[in-house]
Amino acid sequence: MKTKSSYIGALSPEYALLGLLYLKPAHGYQLHQRLAEDLGQIWHISLSQTYNILKRLEAQGFIEASIQEQSKLPDRREFQLTKTGDERFSEWFHSPTGSSVRAIRVEFTTRLYFARKINLQMAERLIDDQVTETNAGLGRLNAMLADIPPGQVFNRLGLELRIRQLASIIDWLEECRIALAQYQ
């Protein structure tokens, strides 16, 4: 079971950057552009944030840079994953996403993006696993709702909203499956 700190860390854009480097080495600006183009509705980070994350990942040994000389331009640093970085991305990639709306919107969608790039069957399994996890989350919330007395109106309303959000995510997950099949 994830601790709160590791759960928050799983929602960090560092995993999106590690994933992009898993797919292909790149320099910082290329990574930022790919993130903005492919996952811009999920991750909103500035170019300076991208470079700060890359600096931290390099200091932690998850990525390394090679210098690319350019005529009439400053040298560029092309980043690639280290073995440790590959392991970190793989561990995150193969971890389950919880059943919170935010985790599904950010973490699951990012995992699905990489699964589709790496292996379409993996993307389909990821959707299946998320449907199972989300249904389990719905079951837990419905059980909680049953225990809340009718007089606790706002507790009930808040929980009912969460239940409806998760129910709509089940529909959205089925739409994900259809979208992936259409754009193979």
Image: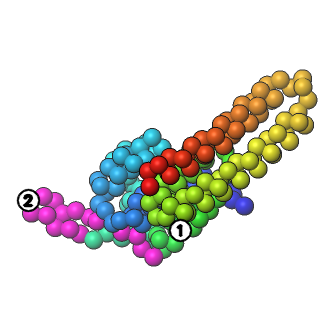
Q: Residue at x 8, y 59 (%)?
A: 72
Mostly what secondary structure, the magenta segment?
strand
Location of the C terminus by quadrant is bottom left
Does 105 lie within the magenta span? Answer: no
Q: Under tag 2, what secondary structure?
A: loop
Segment colored magenta: 67-83
Instruction: Give the mark, 2 or 1, whose residue is nearer the N terminus.
Output: 2
The residue labelled by disc 2 is 72
Q: Quadrant of residue 140?
A: top right
What x and y, as percent, mark residue 100? Answer: 66, 44
- Left or right: 138, with 12 as reference point: right
Residue in front for this viewpoint, 179 or 75: 179
The residue labelled by disc 1 is 90
Q: Look at discs 2 and 1 and give the one toward the viewer.
A: 1
Asked if residue 65 is positioned above or below residue 51 in the image, the reply reads below
- Left or right: 145, with 53 as reference point: right
Residue in front for this viewpoint, 139 or 15: 139
- Left or right: 70, with 93 as reference point: left
Q: Residue at x 48, y 58 (%)?
A: 116
Task: Tell me the distance, in whole angstroms, between the alpha carbons under discs 2 and 1.
Answer: 38 Å
Amino acid at pointer 1: Ser
Q: Residue at x 70, y 38 (%)?
A: 167
Residue in front for this viewpoint, 107 or 7: 107
Does 77 lie within the magenta span? Answer: yes
Crowd tier of the residue under label 1, counting other residues whose Cα lies within 10 Å: few below 14, some 14–19, many 20 or above: some
Asked if residue 71 is positioned above or below residue 42 in the image, the reply reads below
Location of the N terminus by quadrant is bottom right
Residue furthest toward the front?
182
Q: Residue at x 9, y 63 (%)?
A: 71
Amino acid at pointer 2: Lys
What x and y, as percent, mark residue 148? Answer: 88, 33
